Amino acid sequence: MAKKPKRSGGKRKRRQTGASAQSGFAAGRVRADDDRDEEPGHHRILRGGRNRETLAEGPTRGELEVEVREGRVAGIRAADLVVEPKEGGEPVVCRLRKSTRVPHPEANAVAVGDWVRWIAEGEPPFVLTEVLPRRTRLARTRRGRDEQVIAANVDYAVVVTTAAEPPFKPRLVDRYLISVGGGGLEPVLVLNKIDLADLDEIEPMVAPYRRLGLPVFAVSAQTGEGIDALLGFLTGRTAVFSGQSGVGKSSLLHRLTGRELETQEVYGKLGKGRHTTSSSTLYDLPAGGAAIDTPGIRSFALHDPNLETLHAFFPEIVEASAACRFANCRHSGDGGCAVSEAVGKGKVEAGRLESYRILREEIGG
Ligand SMILES: Nc1nc2c(ncn2[C@@H]2O[C@H](COP(=O)(O)OP(=O)(O)OP(=O)(O)O)[C@@H](O)[C@H]2O)c(=O)[nH]1
Ligand SMILES: [Mg+2]
Ligand SMILES: [Zn+2]
């Protein structure tokens, strides 16, 4: 419990001076009108830095009669939950029971990053009494199915991409950044493997995202370049790393935490020397905070698609569209479209308009 106030205090100060503070996109415009958690039937979920302390409320009187402990889910292996006690010490194995109180839909009763309470009696696996309400979540929506919560109670959604191997794909990066924007998380872009590219190739890759006000870090997990700056930024917070398979998420986590990754990954080596991650794992950062490694994602359906999120991500397109002949112009190449003209004049990047069109088509707005 002692850890929490310390974390948020130091970090809040820094956030005001950080790159994200100037950005409408990163600083919260995206989620300002996201009121999904207040729908009837949903448990009210506290989120955002302001609510940080409220998560740490103590056990109720009744629970004090048995030894109830609190901690955070670091990994899920079938029915076994690997939980890190809040007060430190060795992780313990816990299990959900029918009696476990769960404040959110049962389909994702527990996810890596959830805070939980359990009765520390007898031999493990211990029985969870309760999963605490989630402050934020990174979820994947799949057509016709319940959403799948990838990580809970995270501050940053770190989208990992590469300067090379695999080649940088800005359209995919746009998609990822938009996808992570809906769950109450702040997107962060990491360009990894900069050791494989020339310096003058790197800046043009990241410049459009810096202009959006997104926190952007160009790093190499291999040489360690840029890692200190990234670690400084993440310290005291919880970040979930996502991105395509092979971009170096696990390698970055290894660098950032300075510890050996799960043995499972080391032994789970596939053919070409790859250590493909098969489930999410939370690792503590050396100076406070945590980072969650996730399996590589192939497709990433838009999380809670909406036009507002899209427009917050494409401010230059919104600006140019003021001069479109038709108010409901979709900027898809019809006459009188000022956005298409702005591309001709070099004011809007063609690739960004292409992303916008694809994503807008998907949203159906
Ligand atoms: N040259 C170079 N190679 C890197 C760097 N970071 C990671 N790699 C290599 O890229 C490959 C994939 O790295 P991983 O860390 O396993 O990638 P991942 O994103 O965790 O992949 P999944 O678990 O499949 O999602 C490995 O062979 C790493 O050694 C880097 O900064 N530079
Ligand atoms: Mg991995
Ligand atoms: Zn238009």
Image (cartoon, helix red, strand yellow):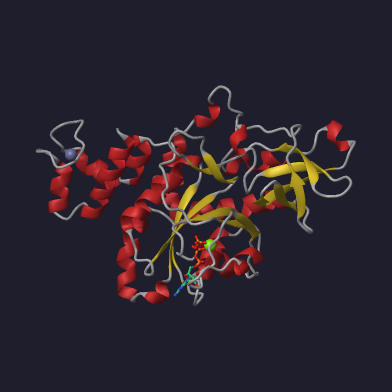
> Is 240 in front, or is 244?
244
Residue drawn at the location 19% of the way across and 34% of the way down: 329
> Is 275 in front, or is 140?
275
Whole-percent x and y of residue 200? Answer: 30, 73
- Residue 229, compared with residue 171, is above or below; it is below
Whole-percent x and y of residue 256? Answer: 58, 67
> Is 141 in front, or is 188?
141
Q: Quadrant of residue 309?
A: top left
Q: Quadrant of residue 335?
A: top left
Whole-percent x and y of residue 202? Answer: 34, 69
> Is 296 in front, or is 41?
296
217 sits left or right of 92 in the view: left
Q: Quadrant of residue 163?
A: bottom left
- Residue 339, compared with residue 173, is above or below; it is above
Question: Which residue is at the far top?
Answer: 40
279 sits left or right of 169 in the view: right
Whole-percent x and y of residue 69? Answer: 80, 45
Q: Is residue 349 visible?
A: no
